[in-house]
Image (tube, rainbow, N blue to C red):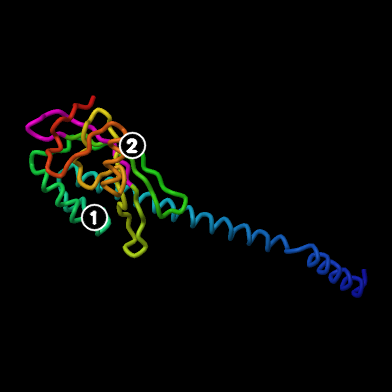
C-alpha cells in the first residue's frame, strides 16, 4: 500500500471512530470514574453507619450506668436540660436494669436514622421490673459531624395504666396529644402531681 493510501485509511478510521462515539479508552475511563464515585458514596455511607452505631452504643451505655449528663449530650441541645432534670427528679430509687438494642437503621438520605431499644427498669420500693420499648429518631449534624437524638417515642403498654416515667419519652412530641392517645387506648395518663409507679401493673 502506497503512502497516500495509508493516509486515506487513517482518515477513514478516525472519521468512523468519531462518528460512532467515544473510543474504548474513553469508555473504560468513564466506567472507572463511575465505579470510583460509587465506591466513595458507599464508603461515606458505611462511615456514617459506623458512627451511628458508636453513638447509639455510647448513649445507651451512659444511660445504663446512670451518667445522665453524659447521655444528654447525644440529644438535641434544646432537650438536654429537661432530660437531665427528669432523671434527677426520679432520684436514686430509679434504676435501669438492662438496655437491649433491637434495630438500628439508616435512612436513604444518610442523614436520618432510627433505633429501637428495649429498656427494663424498676423504682424502689417496688422491685417489679418494667419494660418499655423506645424508638428514637436520630439526625446527622453537618456542623458537628455527629449524630444526635431528635425525638424519642414509646410503644404503648396496655398492661400499664400510666405512661412510663422515662423523661422526655412520649407517644408524640405533644404531651396533650400523648395523653389523648393513651386515653383512647385505655391507658390512664399520668398527672403532674402523681407518682409514676402508682397503680402500675408488672410487665411480663
Label 2 neighbourhood size at 10 Å, few (<14), some (14-19), many (20+)?
Answer: few
Against 23, is 72 above or below?
above
Q: Residue extending furthest top?
A: 204
Q: Do residues under tags 1 and 2 come within 8 Å of each other at their CB atoms? A: no
Residue in the picture at 36% in, 39% down: 103
SS for dot 1: helix
Residue in the picture at 46% in, 54% down: 109
Marking on residue 102: 2
Q: Which residues are magenta?
A: 122-136
The reply to whether the magenta stretch includes residue 63 is no
Marking on residue 115: none
The reply to whether the magenta stretch includes residue 126 is yes
- The image shows residue 204 at horizontal and vertical percentages of 23, 24
Against 69, is 181 above or below?
above
| Front-most of residues 128 and 144 | 128
- The image shows residue 66 at horizontal and vertical percentages of 14, 45
Q: Find disc 1 in the rendering and name its residue.
A: 79
Tell me which numbered mark, 1 or 2, is placed earlier along the sequence: 1
Judge left or right: residue 199 versus residue 40: left
Q: Quadrant of the N terminus?
A: bottom right
Amino acid at each position: 500500500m502506497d503512502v497516500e493510501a495509508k493516509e486515506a485509511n487513517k482518515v477513514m478510521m478516525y472519521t468512523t471512530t468519531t462518528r460512532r462515539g467515544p473510543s474504548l479508552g474513553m469508555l473504560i475511563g468513564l466506567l472507572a470514574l463511575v465505579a470510583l464515585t460509587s465506591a466513595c458514596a458507599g464508603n461515606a455511607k458505611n462511615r456514617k453507619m459506623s458512627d451511628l452505631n458508636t453513638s447509639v452504643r455510647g448513649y445507651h451505655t451512659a444511660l445504663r450506668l446512670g451518667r445522665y449528663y453524659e447521655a444528654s449530650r447525644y440529644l438535641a441541645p434544646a432537650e438536654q436540660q429537661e432530660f437531665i432534670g427528669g432523671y434527677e427528679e426520679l432520684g436514686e430509687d430509679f434504676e435501669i436494669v438492662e438496655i437491649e438494642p433491637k434495630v438500628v437503621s439508616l435512612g436513604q438520605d444518610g442523614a436520618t436514622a432510627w433505633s429501637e431499644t428495649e429498656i427494663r427498669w424498676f423504682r424502689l420500693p417496688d422491685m417489679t421490673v418494667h419494660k418499655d420499648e423506645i424508638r428514637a429518631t436520630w439526625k446527622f449534624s453537618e456542623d458537628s459531624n455527629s449524630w444526635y437524638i431528635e425525638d424519642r417515642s414509646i410503644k404503648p403498654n396496655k398492661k400499664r395504666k400510666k405512661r412510663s416515667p422515662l423523661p422526655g419519652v412520649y407517644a408524640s412530641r405533644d404531651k396533650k396529644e400523648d395523653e389523648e392517645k393513651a386515653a383512647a387506648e385505655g391507658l390512664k395518663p399520668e398527672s403532674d402531681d402523681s407518682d409514676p409507679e402508682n397503680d402500675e401493673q408488672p410487665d411480663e
